[in-house]
Amino acid sequence: MGYKKGKNGEFAAIIFVLAQFVAVWGVAAVGVNSLVALNILWIPKFGIAGAAWASTVSYTISFLGSLFFYCRLSGNRWMKVLLPQRSDWAVYWHTEMVLGRWAKAKLRVLL
């Protein structure tokens, strides 16, 4: 997604940034409000298990809302965001090699 440059382009850019801001804070507000409401409902009835379930449900709501707005604003499909892509494996492999070398160097110092 983008915006036009020119006289009206600055206004469009401001609106685009404000929409992102509202989306992020809206998802956060829904997550916090659902956590408080579910805690009020479930803690008296289920105790600590109710608190755990309330946290799980509210974090899931926040995750799904964040995923929805990210996909809408970025243009990425949700399957591409959630599942590792072929190009990701090269990054994982390189990270594993770097961490392996680092761990080997630390073990040499310790031993």
Image (cartoon, helix red, strand yellow):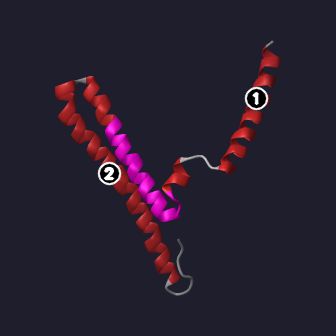
Q: CA distance from mark 2 to mark 1?
A: 41 Å
Magenta residues: mostly which secondary structure? helix
Q: Tag 2's secondary structure?
A: helix
Q: Secondary structure at mark 1?
A: helix
Q: What residue lies at 51% left-to-right and 52% top-to-bottom?
A: 79
Q: Is residue 47 magenta?
A: no
Q: Position of residue 69 (x, y in %)?
A: 43, 59
Q: Around disc 1, counting alpha carbons within 10 Å, would you say few (fewer than 14), some (14 to 19), or many (20 or more)?
A: few
**Residue ID at (21%, 29%):** 43
Q: Residue furthest bottom?
A: 7
Q: Residue at position x 25%, y 40% from top?
A: 36
Q: Neighbour class for label 2 at 10 Å: few (<14), some, many (≥20)?
A: few
The quadrant the C terminus occupies is top right
List x then y, in percent, for residue 8: 49, 85
Give the answer, above or below, for where 37 lies relative to 102.
below
Looking at the image, tell me whether mark 2 or mark 1 is earlier in sequence order.
Answer: 2
**Type of amino acid under label 1:** Gly
2 relative to 35, above or below:
below
Side (left or right) of 80 relative to 28: right
Q: Which mark is residue 100?
A: 1
- 2 or 1: mark nearer the eye: 1
95 with respect to 66 (left or right):
right
Q: Which region of the structure is painted magenta?
A: 56-77
Q: Is residue 70 magenta?
A: yes
- Amino acid carrying label 2: it is Ala
In the image as oriented, which residue stretches furthest toward the top? 111
Q: Residue 29, labelled with which disc?
A: 2
